[in-house]
Image: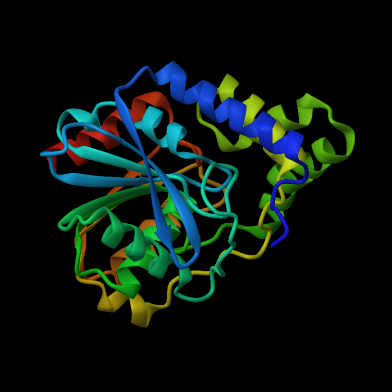
Amino acid sequence: MKSLFKSPQGKQEILSLYDQKLNELNIDSDYLQVETSFGRTNIIATGDPSNPPIILVHGSNGCAPIALETYPNLSKSFRVFAVDVIAQPNKSAETRPSMKDDSYGKWMNEVIDQLKITDVRLAGFSFGGLVILKTLEYDESKIKEVFLSAPAYIVNGNPIKALFKFFIPMRRYMSTGKIKFVESFLKEVFSDRDEFAIKYLSKVFEHFTMDFSPVPVISDKKAKLIKTPINLIAAKQDVLFPGEKMIKRATQIFPSLKESVLLKNSKHVQSAQDNRFIENLILEA
C-alpha cells in the first residue's frame, strides 16, 4: 500500500510535531495500540482506569494530542481514550476508508471492542463528528451518549465560499510554500490564532496526501434510527458546516437529540473559552 505521507522525511517532520505537542501537555498517559480490520490504531489513554470511558475523536488532518489539549479536564472524571483516526497525519494505519459507506463506523466499533469497554461516551470535532455518527449507524449498542462539536455529516456550507476561503489559500501554500497562505486559511477556520496549528498544518499540507472527496450528509432515514442521546454544539460563523442550518436540520431528523447549542461568536474551530464550555457540558451531562 502506498503511504499517504509523501516522503519518509515529511512523515518524520509531522510526527515530531505530534510528539512535541504530547510532551507539552505533560500528562500521565498510556500508549495503546489495537488491531482492526483496517490496520493498527494508535490511542493515548489518560485518567483513572476505574472512571467511565470517553473516546475523543479529532478532526480532519488532526491527531490525538490535539484532542487531549482541547478538553484537558475530562481526565479528572473519565478514562479518556484519544484516538488517532486512521488515514490522518498521525500514528495510526494509513488505510483510507470511504466516507460514503459504513467503514468508519465499523472501524470505531472494532476499536471499542478491542478496548473491551461499554457504556462509552464519544466526543468529536468536525470530521470526528462524521466518524461518531457513522459509529451510531453501524452499531450503537455500546455507546451511552455523544457530543458533536461543529460536526461534519449533518449539513454542508456554500462550496463557493469554501473554495475561496479555504481551498485556494491551501493550494497556493502548497505551490509556493509561503506561510502567509496557511495563516490566511487558518484565519477563516480558527476562532483563536493557534501557533501550533500553523506549524502542524503547514507540514501536513506539504507532506501528506489529504482527502478532498466531498463530505456526505446523513440521510433522514438513518438519522431517525439513532437512539443514542446526541448533544450538538454548532458554530454560527462556521463556513464549512453552518451552525444555524445544522441545528435546524438536526432538530428535524434526530429524535434522540438531547441538546443543541449555537456558539454565536465561533468559527469552525472553537476558541479556548468555547472549548471550556463544551468540556463542562460533557462533565455535567
How far across and down, in percent of the image, does residue 189 sit? Answer: 58, 38
Q: Position of residue 133 (x, y in %)?
A: 36, 64
Q: Residue at x 22, y 51 (%)?
A: 121
User: What residue is rendered at 74% in x and 36% in y?
Assistant: 10
Q: Quadrant of the C terminus?
A: top left
Q: Nearer the viewer, residue 253 or 95?
A: 95
Decide: is 75 above or below 106: above
Percent from the top left, x then y, of residue 39?
50, 60
Residue pushed farthest bottom?
A: 221
The residue at the point 35 percent across, 58 percent down is: 111
In this rendered view, identify the residue nearer to me: 46 or 272.
46
Looking at the rendered structure, the number of numbered marks drawn on it comes to 0
Q: Residue furthest left?
A: 50
Q: What residue lies at 65% left-to-right and 25% top-to-bottom? A: 199
The quadrant in which residue 273 appears is top left
Q: Quadrant of the N terminus?
A: bottom right
Taking the view exactly as shown, the residue that stands out farthest to the right is 176
Expressed as whole percent of the image width and height from the top left, the position of residue 277 reads: 27, 32
Front residue of 208 and 136: 208
Asked if one can make out residue 233 in the rendered structure from this viewpoint, the answer is: no
Give the color scheme: rainbow, by chain, secondary structure or one colour: rainbow
Instruction: Please indicate, yes or no, whether residue 66 appears anywhere in the rendered image.
Output: yes
Left or right of 24? Residue 144 is left
